[in-house]
Amino acid sequence: MHIHGDEGNTHDHGTGTHTHTHGGYTHTHSPEHDKKVMNRLSRAIGHLEKVKDMVERGEDCSDVLIQLAAVRSALTATGKVILQEHISHCIVHAVESGDDREVEELNEAIAQFIK
């Protein structure tokens, strides 16, 4: 088992879980959640690699744009999974404990995500 951490984050490679701390509240992500996120990221990476190959082969711009839309969609879906998990665990606890800083940080992250 290898455990390492930084700034309130701990990763346990033996169990596949990782935790992070928000204002004193520690949240552990399940291996299932992490697998769902990793699968979605892999899908986005696959789409992006296809875009790169298409550009290298000089394929039609319309087809490249359609494939780029698939990349954007895959990334948006990944963000939604992460956001749902964060709201259902970390933000609920932050609101219950009156941690306005955590809610402000989420609002800033959402603003960046939807740009």
Image: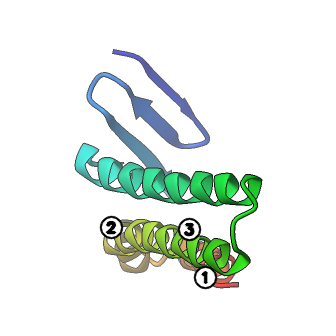
Label 2 sits on what residue type?
Answer: His
| Mark 3 lies on residue | 71
Vertical position of residue 17 compared to residue 86: above or below: above
Whole-angstrom CA distance, mark 1 to mark 3, is 24 Å
Q: Point out the tag, 1 or 2, that comes first from the N-terminus.
A: 2
Q: Point out the tag, 1 or 3, that comes first from the N-terminus.
A: 3
- Left or right? Give the position of 95 relative to 108: left
Task: State the quadrant of the N terminus.
Answer: top left
Whole-angstrom CA distance, mark 1 to mark 2, is 16 Å
Q: Measuring 69% from the left and 77% from the top, which residue is drawn there?
A: 112
Q: Measuring 43% from the left and 73% from the top, which residue is drawn there?
A: 77
Tell me the crowding category of disc 2: few under 14, some 14 to 19, or many 20 or more residues within 10 angstroms, Cα based.
Answer: some
Tell me the crowding category of disc 3: few under 14, some 14 to 19, or many 20 or more residues within 10 angstroms, Cα based.
Answer: many
Closer to us: 79 or 71: 71
The local secondary structure at tag 2 comes to: helix
x%, y% of residue 82? 43, 65
x%, y% of residue 30? 26, 48
Label 1 sits on what residue type?
Answer: Asn
Determine which quarter of the picture holds residue 58: bottom right
| Mark 2 lies on residue | 89
The local secondary structure at tag 1 comes to: helix
Number of numbered labels in the structure image: 3
| Mark 1 lies on residue | 107
Q: Point out the tag, 3 or 2, that comes first from the N-terminus.
A: 3
Label 3 sits on what residue type?
Answer: Val
Circles 1 and 2: CB distance less than 8 Å?
A: no
Whole-angstrom CA distance, mark 3 to mark 2, is 28 Å
